[in-house]
């Protein structure tokens, strides 16, 4: 059986793991100690984890976050979520075909009184916002409890291998997300008044001001804070299209979890839907992991993410199809191809423009929604509550850091009046960091007869300033009062020392340096490179690409340079004719022919599209009830079970509202569904004080 493990990565270290044996349907499989069942299965090429009880449709990993039940398997005869359960030696794993049988209990479980805890401040979420708030509270000695449902702190930072944008002085711009997570975690650990519970999930906020917490996945605890801070981040939006539940259709977060945390390849040929920063960055991460990216579709005329992210993919050989949408994921048991089509000004597919691409995986990255249920419920009950990060407003992680700092000081002001007012500059910086991409300017290609010249291929106004701090001579200028300006080189062709710090340190890989000194007609070009060095060596022929992804010509690699303190970004030196040298922005990573389009397309009726993944409810079932006059989503739920699944309607609710809109029903005529009180499903025994290990011990007696 092939292995799909990542054994070399240009950014991430590959740790040594003890290999253990688990069994899938009775067959032995190698697994790494400490990894999840889902990682072990995917590493061994297994994509289908079971079959749905309603229509026997194949089920695979979907969220990789424990919030649905698509990856449910039987482990030692007990149903568990594969993405949240760690492998054990000799574990017997089976696909879950249909509904699991309830375990046999021979005697009543041991119950205990539920512990109750009072705490001045409770922070839900250990991502950039929660960590930053906890640090501010810890500095002042405020007793704080921070909980997070993962095994380590950092939130989505632990999945981000790229350098961050923003302000070098304020939010670690120029540092990789994985390293920012470690810095924040280490800083928080210095403050003994801040306690951390990992692998602990907030289940609900109650009217008596208690928050129910599933502590360490074993115990139920009721915590009553004087002040609650919700920093729970965001969840991904999803799309309704035929084939959207096939194994191989992932959200970006699930894909990055598998690639950058679990170090497994969930795909060999990937297609991306969505051109925001999340989709663009995930595509880059896929390329770094050795995965072919056959294309990216974006419904808008231009991608919504930073242009430097878009350009990075384009010049590495990824075709980008703007004004295109996905029509279907195609395949019998798993994804085998994807079909897209061009859309008109009303975002409707244009017949005859269909394009089909062979692929085994589709990544959906079409935006985020705040995870703010706890904050809304706390305010409804009259609790003192604050919100920060993406739970407040969707923005970049750099903005979440600042948002958390402001929330931390706001809580301090609530607790004590001795704290100085929050500096107005903090609020200004937060707004700058939250800002969307601004206008584009034309790329300036200087005509230089001699000397050395940095070429800045960053032409969009975005909040970012590392390049201005990297230049040892201070020749790259960005106004510090508003870092959204396009960087400008202030020197001449004799000012630059060819130190290449700007090349290796730009978060967007958007700076090259052209050196005319040795050969003015065939100057050297320094290009950033963040792929495994074994893939490229001195003398290799490479294809030179422009900023927009236009092929300019070929060249042989003269050298590959590793600068001191380069933070894993190499510099490739090539030589090219002077007429194209300033236009060179990168080198192609994947060949053009692997992204070819097929013409065959089998149309699938839109009404067959699954809206509720958990209960397998189609768009046609929902639409028929709306046309019969149903306007209460609770009634639709009672008839179809849409929204009654494991994810608690987190995925299907927006899609059901979309069908109402398509049918011309105004929002004021719709009765929204009642929110489920528990954030995730839990064993009932938990609320009686049983402990998971006790239940497991009894099952083996």
Image: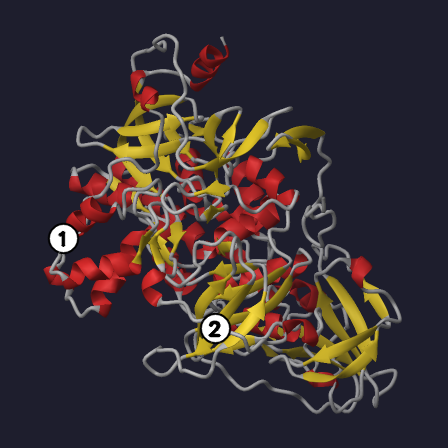
Give the total number of marks visible in the rendering.
2
Cα separation, mark 2 vs mark 1, equals 34 Å
Along the line of sight, which residue is nearer the eye, 50 or 572? 50
Q: Which mark is residue 632?
A: 1
Q: Nearer the viewer, residue 127 or 548?
A: 548
Residue 593 rendering spot, x and y as whole percentages: 69, 75
> Residue 348: percent from the left, percent from the top?
35, 78
Callout 2: helix, strand or loop?
Answer: strand
Quarter of the image with the N terminus is: top right
- Horizontal placement of 226 versus 361: left or right? left
Residue 444: quarter of image: bottom right
**Are discs 2 and 1 less than 8 Å apart at CB?**
no
Residue sitting at x 36%, y 45%: 614
Dividing the picture into quadrants, the one containing residue 618 is bottom left
Q: Which residue is mark 2?
A: 340
x, y percent for residue 330: 50, 63
Identified at 39% across, 58% down, the residue is 238
């Amino acid at each position: 059986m092939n292995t799909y493990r990542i054994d070399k990565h240009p950014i991430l270290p590959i740790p040594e793991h003890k290999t253990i044996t688990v069994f899938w349907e009775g067959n032995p499989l190698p697994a790494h100690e400490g990894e999840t069942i889902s990682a072990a299965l995917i590493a061994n090429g297994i994509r289908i984890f079971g079959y749905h009880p309603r229509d026997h449709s194949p089920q695979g990993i979907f969220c990789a976050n424990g919030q649905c039940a698509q990856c449910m398997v039987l482990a030692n005869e007990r149903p568990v979520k594969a993405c949240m359960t760690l492998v054990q030696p000799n574990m017997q794993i089976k696909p879950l075909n249909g509904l699991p049988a309830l375990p046999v209990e021979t005697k009543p479980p041991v119950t205990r009184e539920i512990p109750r805890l009072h705490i001045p401040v409770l922070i839900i979420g250990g991502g950039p916002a929660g960590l930053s708030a906890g640090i501010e509270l810890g500095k002042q000695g405020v007793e704080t409890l921070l909980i997070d449902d993962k095994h380590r702190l950092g939130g989505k930072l632990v999945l981000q291998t790229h350098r961050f944008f923003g302000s070098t002085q304020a939010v670690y711009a120029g540092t990789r997300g994985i390293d920012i997570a470690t810095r924040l975690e280490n800083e928080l650990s210095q403050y003994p008044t801040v306690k951390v519970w990992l692998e602990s999930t907030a289940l609900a906020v109650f009217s008596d001001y208690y928050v129910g917490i599933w502590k360490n996945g074993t115990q139920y605890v009721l915590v009553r804070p004087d002040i609650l801070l919700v920093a729970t981040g965001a969840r991904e939006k999803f799309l309704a299209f035929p084939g959207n539940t096939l194994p191989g259709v992932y959200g970006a977060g699930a894909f990055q979890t598998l690639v950058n945390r679990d170090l497994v390849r969930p795909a060999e040929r990937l297609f991306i839907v969505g051109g925001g920063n999340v989709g663009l960055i995930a595509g880059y991460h896929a390329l770094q992991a050795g995965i072919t990216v056959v294309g990216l579709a974006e419904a808008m005329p231009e991608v919504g993410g930073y242009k430097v992210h878009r350009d990075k993919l384009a010049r590495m050989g990824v075709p980008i199809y703007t004004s295109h949408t996905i029509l279907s994921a195609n395949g019998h048991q798993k994804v085998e191809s994807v079909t897209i089509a061009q859309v008109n000004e009303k975002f409707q597919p244009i017949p005859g423009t269909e394009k089909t691409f062979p692929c085994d995986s589709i990544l959906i990255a079409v935006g985020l929604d705040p995870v703010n249920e706890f904050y809304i419920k706390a305010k409804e009950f009259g609790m003192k509550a604050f919100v920060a990060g993406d739970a407040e407003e969707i923005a970049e992680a750099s903005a979440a850091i600042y948002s958390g700092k402001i929330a931390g000081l706001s809580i301090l002001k609530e607790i004590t009046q001795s704290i100085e007012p929050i500096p107005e500059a903090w609020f200004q910086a937060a707004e700058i960091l939250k800002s969307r991409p601004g206008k584009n300017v034309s790329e300036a290609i200087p005509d230089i007869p001699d000397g050395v010249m940095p070429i800045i291929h960053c032409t969009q106004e975005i909040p970012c300033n590392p390049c201005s701090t990297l230049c040892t001579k201070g020749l790259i200028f960005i106004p510090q009062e508003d870092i959204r300006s396009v960087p400008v080189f202030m020197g001449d062709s004799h000012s630059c020392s060819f130190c290449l710090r700007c090349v290796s340190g730009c978060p967007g890989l958007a700076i090259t340096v052209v050196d005319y000194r040795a050969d003015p007609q065939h100057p050297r070009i320094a290009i950033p490179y963040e792929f495994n060095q074994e893939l490229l060596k001195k003398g290799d022929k490479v294809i030179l690409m422009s900023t927009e992804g236009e092929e300019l010509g070929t060249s042989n690699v003269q050298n590959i340079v590793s600068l001191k303190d380069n933070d894993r970004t190499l510099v490739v030196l090539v030589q090219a004719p002077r007429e194209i040298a300033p236009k060179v922005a990168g080198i192609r990573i994947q060949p053009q022919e692997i992204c070819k389009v097929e013409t065959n397309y089998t149309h699938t009726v839109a009404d067959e599209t699954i809206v509720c993944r958990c209960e397998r409810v189609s768009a046609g079932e929902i639409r028929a009830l709306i046309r019969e006059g149903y306007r209460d989503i609770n009634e639709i739920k009672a008839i179809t079970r849409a929204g009654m699944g494991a994810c608690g309607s987190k995925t299907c609710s927006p899609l059901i509202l979309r069908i109402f809109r398509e049918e011309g029903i105004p929002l004021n005529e719709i009765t929204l569904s009642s929110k489920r009180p528990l954030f995730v499903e839990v064993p009932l025994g938990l609320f009686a004080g049983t402990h998971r290990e006790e239940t497991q011990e009894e099952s083996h007696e």
